[in-house]
Amino acid sequence: MEFACKTVYDHKTLAAMSKALRRTMRKKTSWCEWLLFLGLVVLALGTVMDASQSIWRRGIYLTVVVLVLFLQWKGDYLNAFFAKRKALPGTDVCRARFYPEFYETEIAGVQTQWQYTKVQALVETKDYIILILGKNQAQAYDKSGLEGRSVREFCGFLSRKTGLHVQTFPR
């Protein structure tokens, strides 16, 4: 059984990878960040509501609240933006072949073989199948670029080879 897939690592793909990492490998860290930011927002809003504070101080704290909420809301997109900027030229297209013993990726003409035992989590989103390799490493495969068989068969194949359950994130 062999599968092939072509994926373009654009902003949307990188954001999906960031979200998958945040919701799997970085779950505990993400939760702590949310609590820290929530505490900061509560303190800042308390200052904004205090009528004895100067208008400038209240404006600064309100700006902090808006900035913190924006960073929490769009964090995955900001991670994707910086990841795209740091990527080497020519590394935006990945071709992968999945064999029974290993899978092979080709990026910018360089082929790399990966063992299924290196995969720590499997994630399925609306558009991608994402293989999580570590706290900061992931590989995304576009469902529309999949060749060979159906997405369901591909997920089953990966699940059998890695011994992991595929986590589904609808958005």
Image (tube, grey):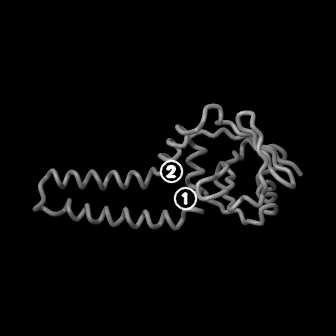
- Which numbered marker is on residue 32? none
Amino acid at the residue labelled 2: Asp
Check disc 1: other Cα within 10 Å, few if <14, some if 14-19, many if 20+: some
Q: Do the residues labelled 1 and 2 touch (CB within 8 Å)?
A: yes
- Which numbered marker is on residue 76? 2
Q: Is mark 2 on a helix, strand or loop?
A: helix
| Residue at the image point whose x is 69% and y is 62% from the top | 120
x and y, in percent, of residue 95 in the image: 75, 40
| Residue at the image point whose x is 31% and y is 63% from the top | 40
Q: Residue furthest top?
A: 89
Amino acid at the residue labelled 1: Arg
Query: For the image shown, how many numbered marks are present on the structure?
Result: 2
Above or below residue 163? Residue 124 is: above
**Quadrant that contains the C terminus:** bottom right
Q: In the figure, residue 52 lies in which quadrant?
A: bottom left
Where is mark 1, residue-wise?
A: 22
